[in-house]
Amino acid sequence: MSNPQRSFFFNVDWISVFIYLALCTIGWFNIHSAAPGTGNLGIFNTSTDYGKQLIYLSIAVPVGIVILLLESRFITALSVPIYVVTTFLLLLVLIPHIGRNVGGNQAWITLGGGFRLQPSEFAKFSTILLLARYLSGTNIKVTELKSFLIAAGIIAFPMLLIMLQPDAGSTLVFSALIFVLYREGLSPYFLILEGLFITLFVLTLKVENHWYIIGALAAIAAIIVFLFKRNKKLVSNVLIGLCICIAFVFSVKFLYNHVLQPHQKVRIDIVLGITSDLKGKGYNVNQSKIAIGSGKLWGKGYMQGTQTKYSFVPEQSTDFIFCTVGEEWGFAGSMVVLGLYLFLVLRIIRIAERQRSPFTRIYAYGVASVIFFHVVINIGMTIGIVPSIGIPLPFISYGGSSLLNFTILLFVLLKLDSNRMGIIYA
């Protein structure tokens, strides 16, 4: 019988690798197409976004291959050191003269030669890795308070450091890991509670007088207590929940008025319909919707997109790269890209469910959750259904840190999966 560890190369999920390469290729061509003056410069010119992205690709793909050659135990053993290193980088970037401020976020470390490192991207990988290491440990049950608090702490600590930059978009990405906890046994009531908080967040900002919301919550709680007054446990939980909801409403008001930056508040107001600013803060989203809509069914063709080619859409190579896809490849091309993402996420979930190792299963769900969150929020930004919070489209948006992080996330999973017939200890 052959050794599974020796034949891992043949156990690699090549379908996922193909999707990865397809998305990276689509990304590079759209970055190239969106760049002004494309015809006057070579594709290897590092003064252009597409030239730099080609360099990033030439680094990311070999890194993926090297990961496939590593020993699986080596990856799991490094979970704590990698988390410590990324945490150190998140602290380092907050220090003046070391961290570089770009777009209002002090989230970058300059490497020289026009290249920068964004530690918050790699924190996603290290957090998922350590979370999988912890939850796959002996006698760890996320339903127990101690285990839940430790798992929540692993997720919350990098969130806090990233929020200090402040980078609200990258911070929110970590909230997607609640699906990992849910898969490992967390009560579905936590998902319902998260949905309730999102609803309260929107209502608190939409309704001018927040006392109306508090009054409505109190009335609902009173009705439930009256109907189920004999169930003391339920009554107690309802009253505790009421207090938490009231505290949340007040905290939303405080954060909105005293913590969020002015440009962040305006973006939220525009999405919620509180205000309209098509020539100011709402300009990006408005131009984005125009670009996508102008592509119609089949698009204008490669390098024929006027909205993105002539920079009517800001950040068309990074956060708003999907505009280029919509304008030049139309609805059909957009559906192809969305189909690739959907297929990749479903493929990762399938990989997760065929594992014998809890570590790999938990890690896989972490990867699926983060990729899914990025895709939904990024595309939601471009079509104006969620606030513009500035997170990249995986494998497609311009950026070395993002591309390398998602490459590592995916290829570590493929390596662990290739050894699924063996035993992996956390």
Image (cartoon, rainbow, N blue to C red):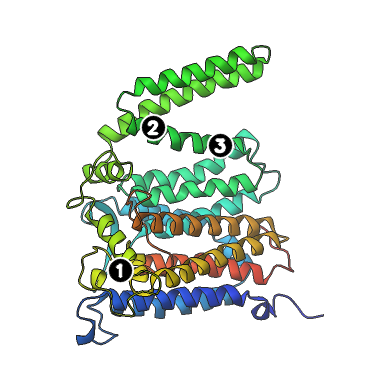
- Label 2: state its secondary structure: helix
Q: Is residue 303 above or below residue 178?
A: below
Callout 3 crowding tier (Cα within 10 Å): few <14, some 14–19, many ≥20: few
**Which mark, residue 203?**
2
Report which residue position mark 1 lands on: 317
**Is residue 141 in view?**
yes
Q: Residue at x 32, y 76 (%)?
A: 300
Q: Are marks 3 and 2 in contact (CB under 8 Å)?
A: no
Task: Answer with left or right where residue 99 lies relative to residue 331.
Answer: left
Task: Report, in whole angstroms, how far the alpha carbon at label 2 lies from the one at label 1.
Answer: 34 Å
Taking 236 as reference, is 114 left or right?
Answer: left
Residue extending furthest toward the front = 297
Q: Residues within 10 Å of mark 1 (few under 14, many from 20)?
A: many
Q: Which residue is mark 3?
A: 192
Q: CA distance from mark 1 to mark 3?
A: 36 Å
Q: Secondary structure at mark 3?
A: helix
